[in-house]
Image (cartoon, helix red, strand yellow):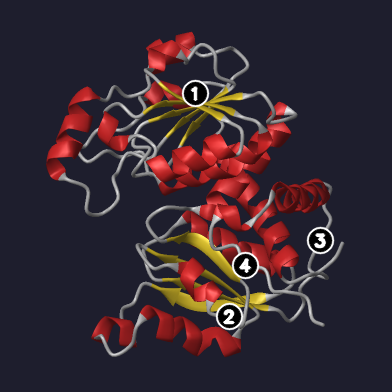
Amino acid sequence: MGKIMKHFTQTKDFSKEDYLEIFRRAQIIEDGIKQGKEFTHLCPGKVMATMFLQESTRTSASVQSAIIKLGGGWFGMSGIKGTYLESGEESVEDTLKGVAPLCDIMAVRHKDFDLSALAAKGFRVPLINAMCGREEHSIGAMAYCYFLRRKLGTLAGKKIGFYGLIKSSRPAKAMARAMSHFGVIFYEDAVIPEFQLPKNIFQEVAQNGCQYIQTKLDNFIGEVDCLIVTEGLPQAGEDPKVMEKFNQNFSPISQKELDLLKRDAILIIDEPRAMSDGRSVAMPEVDSDKRESTKEALESIIYTNMALITYLLNIKF
């Protein structure tokens, strides 16, 4: 009997054991790359379809780079211009099914498409959520989990703080779900109640045995091992009046907050940083602070993407 196909359409597709296996592979790959080794022998001839039906910069580049570094190649879409999606003659599902016979694995990005439902119908190749649907940026969360676990030594008992548009941040929601497998203590300041973590994810985090404390930034900034500031722009469809209320109450991260943050804490300012009122979620002085680790964290997505691709394709090493 053949092995059951695995997909990564949402963070809860994976158990703690799955994540640990991804982290094991990612560490081998990271250490090897930094030692000058290559991993092109792992996926020679394998083809990834990168179906990015919504704008993307870092994520699309990261999955394409990952499959190349594994010895494979990619084809795909960047937006829907010039396709049957643009003309309305084909649905997203039809498009994805149409290219599936041409690839071995597929990464998908779309603002609201339900990738899990597609997987449940028996899709013919492994699917990867590259920020697909309204709730998650699954591979982004995996990269941050791997980075923080390696940087901090462990996630168990570590204090992770979120600040900003939590409900509207697909990376933040996915991180809360993924890291809740590892005994993290979460703190959240969503600035206004309307942007707090959705109740269903709050309940999942609690069911996984983690504390999720909603309070003001001043009450936890001096305690956290990592502070994650969400991207500044909301998801499409947010109420403009609620966004105006958020903007009126949000204070960008500045030297004041840097002075309160622990000396050995990690600071991640998610991107894009621009806010809907023209400001940035962080002041310029943040970039020169040694604790600011966003670019270093983003580098981890290459290692975790490579690990994920090999895992879903059942390539052992």
Residue on which disc 1 sits: 288
Q: Secondary structure at mark 1?
A: helix
Q: Amino acid at mark 4?
A: His
Spatial CA distance of label 3 from label 4 is 26 Å
Spatial CA distance of label 1 from label 3 is 33 Å
Residue in view at x 61 percent, y 48 percent: 142
Percent position (x, y) of residue 94? Answer: 41, 86
Kindly identify which numbered label has been placed on residue 7: 4
Spatial CA distance of label 2 from label 4 is 10 Å
Side (left or right) of 255 relative to 150 = left
Spatial CA distance of label 2 from label 3 is 34 Å
Eye-nearest disc, 4 or 1: 4
Of pointers 2 and 1, the one earlier in the residue sequence: 2
Residue in view at x 42 percent, y 48 percent: 170
Q: Secondary structure at mark 3?
A: loop
Q: Secondary structure at mark 4?
A: loop
Screen quadrant of the C terminus = bottom right
Q: Amino acid at mark 2?
A: Gly
Give the crowd class for mark 3: few <14, some 14-19, many >=20 residues within 10 Å: some
Residue on which disc 3 sits: 38
Eye-nearest disc, 2 or 4: 2
Residue on which disc 2 sits: 122
Q: Answer yes or no: do the residues labelled 1 and 3 have beta carbons within 8 Å?
A: no
Q: Amino acid at mark 1?
A: Ser
Percent position (x, y) of residue 274? Answer: 30, 40
Side (left or right) of 252 relative to 271 = left
Q: Answer yes or no: do the residues labelled 2 and 1 have beta carbons within 8 Å?
A: no
Of pointers 1 and 3, the one earlier in the residue sequence: 3
